Image (spheres, grey):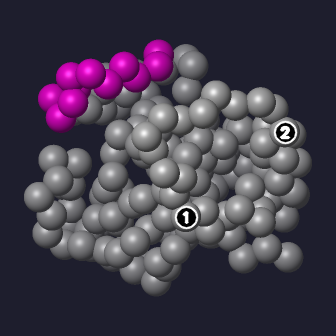
């Protein structure tokens, strides 16, 4: 049994997190501030056109260079990546912070999409999803990669899993 936690995030915010644009995930005051460490980013099961357009407008106000994929290309209801929660804040200078609680993120990375149901708050990754992610990321790790210039690799707490 794995102990990997997940958090469900609406698209296109999940895309912005795993692609390292959004360093803060905003939550309500009652969100359980119980986990600091790595977690999987899960996308919720729906995103309306209105929600998508409002999110894209907000992102472009923060960073005009962001090119968000079309809504139809964004996966829903599954794991799309990973990140690390470094701490919780109730005040922050980041333009991404809306509060009232922010999860300060690092080590964001897209992962191969694996369909899976979600839940509110933190939830455990289902074992079959965890095994599929390990299988897919092991295969991707064997593929040749272009070197990243002038960028030291981040400490990777999921290295043993994916």
Residue at the farthest bottom position: 34
Q: Earlier in the sequence, mark 1 or mark 2?
A: 2
Mark 1–mark 2 Cα distance, whole angstroms, equals: 20 Å
In the rendered structure, which segment of residues is drawn in magenta?
60-70
Q: Is residue 55 above or below residue 134?
A: above
User: 122 or 15: nearer the eye?
Assistant: 15
Q: Please name the residue shown 15% across and 29% down the image.
A: 61
Q: Position of residue 70 (x, y in %)?
A: 47, 16
| Quadrant housing residue 126 | bottom right
User: 106 or 133: nearer the eye?
Assistant: 106
Q: Please name the residue shown 43% across and 28% down the image.
A: 48
Q: Position of residue 148 (x, y in %)?
A: 53, 35
Q: Is residue 57 above or below residue 162?
A: above
Q: Main secondary structure of the magenta part?
A: loop
**Image disc number at residue 142:** 2
SS assignment at label 2: helix
| Quadrant housing residue 136 | top right
The reply, left or right, for residue 58 in relation to residue 87 is: left
Which image quadrant: the C terminus? bottom right
Residue 88 visible in the displayed image: yes
Q: Please name the residue shown 49% across and 79% down the image.
A: 35
User: 80 or 120: nearer the eye?
Assistant: 80
Q: Please name the residue shown 83% across and 53% down the image.
A: 134
The reply, left or right, for residue 144 in relation to residue 123 is: right
The answer to whether residue 3 is magenta is no
**Image disc number at residue 155:** 1
The answer to whether residue 69 is magenta is yes
SS assignment at label 1: loop
User: 18 or 56: nearer the eye?
Assistant: 18
Q: Position of residue 86 (x, y in %)?
A: 40, 71
**Image disc number at residue 26:** none
Residue 27 visible in the displayed image: no
């Amino acid at each position: 049994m794995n102990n990997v936690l997940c958090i469900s995030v609406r698209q296109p915010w999940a895309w912005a997190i795993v692609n390292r644009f959004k360093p803060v995930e905003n939550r309500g005051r009652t969100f359980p501030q119980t986990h600091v460490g790595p977690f999987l980013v899960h996308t919720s099961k729906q995103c309306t056109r209105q929600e998508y357009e409002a999110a894209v407008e907000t992102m472009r106000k923060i960073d005009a260079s962001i090119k968000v994929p079309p809504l139809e290309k964004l996966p829903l209801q599954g794991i799309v990546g990973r990140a690390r929660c470094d701490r919780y804040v109730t005040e922050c200078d980041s333009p991404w912070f809306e509060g009232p609680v922010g999860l300060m993120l690092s080590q964001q990375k897209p992962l191969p999409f694996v369909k899976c149901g979600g839940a509110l708050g933190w939830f455990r990754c289902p074992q079959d999803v965890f095994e599929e992610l390990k299988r897919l990321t092991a295969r991707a790790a064997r593929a040749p990669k272009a070197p990243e210039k002038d960028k030291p690799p981040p400490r990777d707490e999921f290295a043993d899993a994916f």
